[in-house]
Amino acid sequence: MTPAPTPDTPTRWYRTVPDPMVLIFMILVATYLLTFIIPAGEFERVTEAGRTLVVPESFRYLEDVAAIAPFDIFVAIPQGLINASQYLFIVFIAGGLFHILQKTGALENAIGVAVNKVGVQRRNLIITVGTFIYGFFGVAVGYENNIALVPIAVLIASAIGCSSLVGTTMAVGGIGVGFALSPINPYTVGVAQGIAELPTFSGAWLRTLLLLCSLSLLALYICKRVVPMPFKESPDAAGMSRPLNEYTLSQRNLATLAAFVGGLAVMLYGVFTRGWYINEIAAMFLLMAIVIGALNGLSPNGIVARLIEGASSVTAGAMVIGLAASIQVILNEASIIDTIVYGLSGLLSGVPAALTAILASVLQGVINLFVPSGSGQALVTMPILIPLADLVGISRQLMITAFQVGDGLTNLIIPTSGGMLAMIALGRVSYEQWLKAILPFMAMVYLLSFAGLVLGHVVGY
């Protein structure tokens, strides 16, 4: 066993990870340097049925794009904050909502009562069921739409004697895997299958198989690897304040929980029937905070004070989101996103058919760093990859699944994924801590998914 370092022992370079903001700024500078290496270019686009589609084989290089000045690196940061403002605001408002909810004691009491009935000794069962529940929300509701549910998992983890990292991995990992491999994902599968002229959500059996296997792997990974992992808790992290057998639910607690669950139900109704997204969800969180505060006797000034306290506790995580968005600003100003997509898609030429889907998935993961939108990626890359699938002899359905794996799973680690950064911020887990916890799982789930892609090709999926 390696001895623990003492104050006089120099820290080895590979054990030192920069602060998340430093890490993302380094990526921003590297992106800026790429603008001098990668030439500007663009595809032609046409609008059909209200959608903007890329015209295959229409790529051309641009000659009149001015070089970006070094000072623009710093200009990109406030612009990134502006561009990511909807994510920042939902983090601030959700932080305020859960601060008010935490102060009422209703959520803590409910979790304490529930875990006490199930039994702490069934910790692994609670983690497994929780992982699948969060996975279901990722499948059915989406990714960013589930931001409000992360602090609940943190409290559940505290109730069973685990760290905030366990709860955050259960929630964010479950939601991320569910969204990434959802057989009914309208943002990726729906858009891609429309472009490929396939029936909507057809070929669901392979995606469902990958989803169930990946969630099972995640639950096992959390129980065996994340639970014993050393973790330095944030002073703002939610936790249980007393023994489980002392928890009870008062009438006011029940009214508070009813307001919270009712607000989530209204939010989901809006998401599914009215097309609600980040701004509407944030507005619903704000309304829930006001109602819950009033139910618990808070004055208007008291509600505002609690909202500000909660928002201040997630400021660091919100700032990381804005800084990450500045990477996209540089890419757009340099007009090199289409060039990157064009170059990466060209790498698939000449690859054996059995490996094309795997390589396409890897390339989609790289593209996701630059185009962090599933539907956006589908609109850009599917017009290129679908004809390529026809040429190399793999099915369009398999190419779409490869796209979904590459796009979706990388949302759990890339610094340009605003939803992921927002959720780990609410879980009081830093980006550095998150990467240390999730990267080994990512390696395993990718191997599993690649095996699934090979299986799909072999059986003629």
Image (cartoon, rainbow, N blue to C red):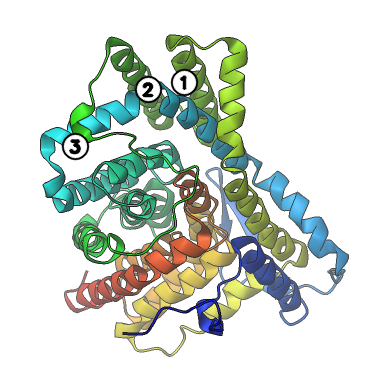
Q: Pointer 3: what residue?
A: 115
Quarter of the image that includes the C terminus? bottom left
Q: How many marks?
A: 3
The image position of residue 295, as x and y in percent, is: 43, 10
3 or 1: mark nearer the eye: 3
Q: Is residue 198 above or below residue 98?
A: below
What's the residue type where badge 1 is placed?
Answer: Met
Q: Is residue 451 visible?
A: yes
State the image coordinates of residue 222 (x, y, percent, origin top left).
26, 60
Q: Residue at x 38, y 29 (%)?
A: 268
Label 1 Cα neighbours within 10 Å, binned few <14 / some 14-19 / many ≥20: many
Residue at left 69%, top 75%? 30
At x 59%, y 11%, the residue is 300
* Mark 3 crowdedness (10 Å alpha carbons): few <14, some 14-19, many ≥20: many
Q: Are marks 2 and 1 in contact (CB under 8 Å)?
A: yes
Residue 235 screen position, x and y as percent = 50, 45
* Element carrying mark 1: helix
User: Which residue, given by chain and number where applicable, does mark 1 sit on?
Assistant: 288
Q: Which residue carries the number 2 mark? A: 260
Amino acid type for the residue under numbered disc 2? Phe
Instruction: Kindly indicate whether the residue at mark 1 contacts the one at mark 3 (C-beta within 8 angstroms).
Output: no
